[in-house]
Amino acid sequence: FESGVLAGQRVVITAGPTQEPLDPVRYISNHSSGKMGYALARAAIEAGAHVDLVSGPVALTAPDRVQLHRVTTAKEMLDACMNLVNDCDIFIGCAAVADYRPVTAAEQKIKKSEEEMSLQLVRNPDVLAQITNCSPKPFSVGFAAETEKLREHAIGKLERKNLDMIVANDVSDSSIGFNSENNAALLLWQNADGDGELNIEQCSKDVLASMVVAQISAIQQRKR
Ligand code: PMT
């Protein structure tokens, strides 16, 4: 796409998983590698944006010129994003934020005892929903990781979280989604100028990220 389409804009991107500690040596997490979020950061930099990348623990190197904010838990990710939202034009939530965390993180390693044990979990804050509640609200893009009813669930998230656009990916297919080199997605958007969608066939995460950035810019142009 045309270079410089996001020139002068400040973009905040979340990437990777969060880790929710159970004790000093264990945590609850998921398979997100950060590859999709880091590809978005590269695409936004190439498009001329200033990029803050709020990243959970991943084994990737941040792209040059990106401002990296490392976090571990959902609460830390929320705090880092809230500190950046005032200066943010575009927010892209690509992180796989853990929906729940253990009620308490034990100070010492939990010892083996009974045959069975239960964990009590509590809901984590929704980073994206809190960002879209801010005023002024940045142009907000969410991801939807689905294993069934991709479109239906994605539309629900687009509306519930008050998003400008959602990137829905099917994570039941291991060749795309979590921790793979490629992805495929259904982009859905809604705004005062109307609704739209774009189906992106399987391609590298870098190509998909460039297409997401181009679509964000196209929608912004129409708004002006
Ligand atoms: O990191 P990779 O290995 O490259 O994999 C990429 C990916 C599959 C993780 C990515 O493409 C993706 O789908 N990310 C979103 C994963 C997810 O948590 O989706 P969700 O449908 O549960 O959440 C919907 C949206 O709300 C997401 O934008 C998520 O960032 C956000 N959310 C969810 C829960 C929460 N507590 N806070 C949030 O901000």
Image: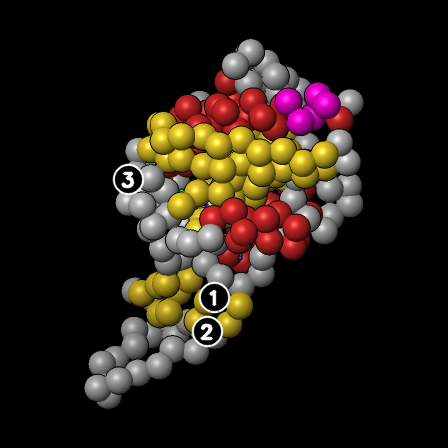
Q: Residue at x 50, y 56 (%)?
A: 74
Whether the magenta-drawn stretch holds residue 105 is answered as no
Q: Amino acid at mark 1?
A: Tyr
Between label 1 and label 3, give the one nearer the viewer.
3
Q: Secondary structure at mark 1?
A: strand
Q: Which residue is mark 2?
A: 121
Q: Which tag, 1 or 2, sits closer to the chain's start? A: 1
Circle on res. 175: 3
- Between the residue at mark 1 and the residue at mark 2, the CA separation in whole angstroms equals 6 Å
Circle 1/circle 2 CB separation < 8 Å: yes
- Residue 175 visible, this orientation: yes
Q: Secondary structure at mark 2?
A: strand
Depth check, front residue: 194 or 25: 194
Depth check, front residue: 220 or 88: 220
Highlighted magenta segment, given as a residue range: 218-222
Give coordinates of residue 210: x percent, y percent.
Answer: 48, 23
Compared across the picture, whether 72 is left or right of 113 comes to: right
